[in-house]
Image (tube, grey):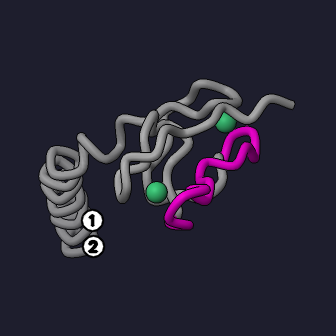
Amino acid sequence: MILLLLIILGLLIWRLSGELSWSRKTIDEAEYSCAGCGKQVNQAWGVCPYCQERLTRTCSACHQKTHLGHRYCPYCGQQSRQETR
Ligand SMILES: [Zn+2]
Ligand SMILES: [Zn+2]
């Protein structure tokens, strides 16, 4: 029983330290807000998990996938057009 507690405690500490370094490493990439609901979303995500808004779009100039939060295409500099519905 004590061994189990120690293992859980160890896992918690390991996860905590892992998350700390992970969040510090990806803080720049994570600073995107969804165009639909305004919640913080990850750059790597294609669809917002909160409101299912699409987060990526295909650049009209170079056809690379870019984030909707980008004002300009990071690959070719093409200005992103705001798609209005
Ligand atoms: Zn959203
Ligand atoms: Zn482009």
Q: Residue at x 36, y 35 (%)?
A: 31
Q: Mark 1: which amino acid?
A: Ile
Q: Is residue 3 above or below residue 30?
A: below
What residue occupies the far right of the structure in this picture?
85
Circles 1, 2 touching at the beta carbon (< 8 Å):
yes
Q: Position of residue 54 (x, y in %)?
A: 69, 49
Q: Mark 2: which amino acid?
A: Leu
Q: Position of residue 84 (x, y in %)?
A: 79, 29
Q: Quadrant of residue 15?
A: bottom left
Q: Residue at x 45, y 39 (%)?
A: 70
Q: Give the mark toward the camera: 1 or 2.
A: 1
Task: Give the number of the disc on residue 22.
Answer: none
Kindly state the secondary structure of the residue where label 1 is placed: helix
Q: Is residue 22 above or below residue 7?
A: above
**Magenta region, main secondary structure:** loop
Is 46 displayed left or right of 52 in the figure? left
Task: Give the number of the disc on residue 4.
Answer: 2
Q: How dense is the environment of label 2, judged by Cα within 10 Å: few (below 14), some, or many (20 and up)? A: few
Asked if the stretch drawn in magenta spans residue 39, the answer is no
Q: How dense is the environment of label 1, judged by Cα within 10 Å: few (below 14), some, or many (20 and up)? A: few
- Which span is picked out in magenta? 49-64
Q: Which residue is tagged 1? A: 8
Figure quadrant of the C terminus = top right
Q: Judge by depth and name the residue closer to the eye, 78 or 74.
A: 78
Q: Judge by depth and name the residue closer to the eye, 55 or 60.
A: 60
Q: Residue at x 43, y 51 (%)?
A: 43
Q: Residue at x 15, y 44 (%)?
A: 24
